[in-house]
Image (tube, rainbow, N blue to C red):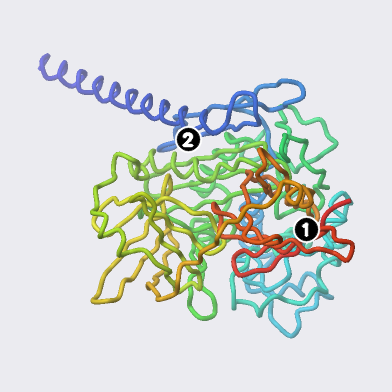
Amino acid sequence: MIYSRKTFYIGILLIGLSAISYAQKLEKQFDKMLSEQYLPMEPGVTALVAIDGKIIYHKAFGMANLELDVKMEPDMVFEIGSITKQFTSVAILMLMEQGKLNLDDDITNFIEDYPTHGHNISIHHLLTHTSGIKSYTSMESWAPVWRKDFEPKELIDFFKNEPMDFAPGEEWRYNNSAYFILGYIIEKASGQTYEQFIETNIFKPLGMQSSLYGSNSEIIKKRAYGYQKKGNYVNAEYLSLTQPYAAGSLMSTVEDLFIWNRAIRSNKLVKKESIELAFTNYQLNNGEKINYGYGWSINEINESQTVEHAGGIFGYLTNSIYLPNEDVFVAIYSNCGCNGPGQVSTKMAAIAIGKPYLGQEDIISVKSDNLKKLVGVYDFADSSSRIITIEDNQLYSQRSGSSKIKIYPIKKNTFSYDNHFATIQFQENGNEIKAFFANRINKTEGVKTDKPIPVHNEIQLDLELLERYIGVYEINPGFDITITIEDKKLMSQATGQQKFQIFPESQTKFFLKAVDAQIEFIENDNGNFESFILYQGGQEIAGKKKN
């Protein structure tokens, strides 16, 4: 009996040591990943990972304030952007359970004068981004009023007369107007402001003490300041937080978001059957799944289901992922609009569930002749094209309008994208070669065509001519492409993105090697280059030089 008891305690001790060892292994991996992406003297991140309801990782990297040399700390408060949408959706579900609204209610029940153009636009359509209403953040007239404070009805009036993008339920298109309207519906149905409803019905009952409706003027303890990168780091553009409203104006910490996650999981705010509505993968009118519920995206990591959402607002990028079957939660907030946490948070979640993305150690050897057979232009069912090329026995894949990316063989006929979850599998059938592209839940099938691979022949131009192209060209308000010269090379840099060299193929036309894009400079009557056309992804985008 004594021996059995001793054996039992030794077994318990070994299990405990094994769990500690596993947590330490994860910590080292996560530290390495985050410290490599978020450097000590640059804008940083806070990160949290929880497994089975217990926080196993909670750290910060980089700086919270560059001007005052304040280091980031794990409990810093961030603007969370569109992660706000899940709070809005749950608020709607709470009001539904209280009998104050129904999901199939038309929006005119709450905004009588809203022009629906003869359509029924329901709360469900708003929640799922299938309403067809124009998103105000895509309107050219929005940027000039970023700094203005609006009452909710005023901003609705600002966008309500825009033509609809499509009939309700016909398409899925991310829509900030829809969630803005949901905030107004919450006010009308509850008799409280959106801020009051979220504060009194969600934040306070759950003990989310570091969460609030955002403010630029209030003193907010532990606020991480937001930045953008325009060559150097700069303070983020000012945006009145009356404008993101129920689509993106909340502030929080990663630990408070974990409290929120546990409350949702344990049905503290709404019944199980109600929250399941938020995690349903809804369909368009034609039956096509949209991979979105109510305020959460529906996705997967190596065939493990996820519910997740990213957030982006001036100076901040955020991401959270939850894997319900494994009970793993990951949240990462960054305080720069230049260095998103989406990829690293996905990799950390994959590691936490024991399904890491494939690395260099998983590459297998493939004969050169077998690689060469795959080279060509592939047309896919989602209307995209991918060009497969080979250089020094290395395959590359380039989606139309995107960057050229290395792909590595990981098993017969299957290739993994460099440092990514995406894969592409080739299948030969006689003279036909098919390609099956998968990026997590998104999958599409393509076929190799007879189209020639586009070829650009580089020429040499005098430095004197190259200098005439230098300048800042505005694409949209707040988004520019800057043309500079470095070491006699013409360089282009879009706002918040890295620099790329552009190569001349004529005196006015240039191409990028890293990205499938071309720039054509337009000469005016005075012989000056004051504008250009950017050709990318099948679009022709005009840019005008700023004075």
Q: Earlier in the sequence, mark 2 or mark 1?
A: 2
Residue closest to the eye, 99 or 111: 111
Residue 189 visible in the current orientation: no
Which x, y percent locates residue 392?
36, 49
Q: Which residue position is annotated with label 1?
A: 476
Q: Which residue position is annotated with label 2?
A: 49
Position of 466 compared to 124: left or right? right
Residue 349 visible in the current orientation: yes
The kind of residue on which mark 1 rests is Asn
Name the residue located 64 percent from the left edge and 24 percent from the top edge. 41
Which x, y percent locates residue 375?
36, 63
Label number found at residue 172: none
**Count of marks overlaid on the render:** 2
Give above or below for 69 relative to 484. Answer: above
Whether residues under marks 2 and 1 lie with C-beta atoms below 8 angstroms apart, the answer is no
Residue closest to the eye, 284 or 387: 387
Which x, y percent locates residue 226?
72, 36
The kind of residue on which mark 2 rests is Val
Give above or below for 532 relative to 362. Answer: below
Which x, y percent locates residue 213?
75, 43
Give above or below for 407 relative to 340. Answer: below
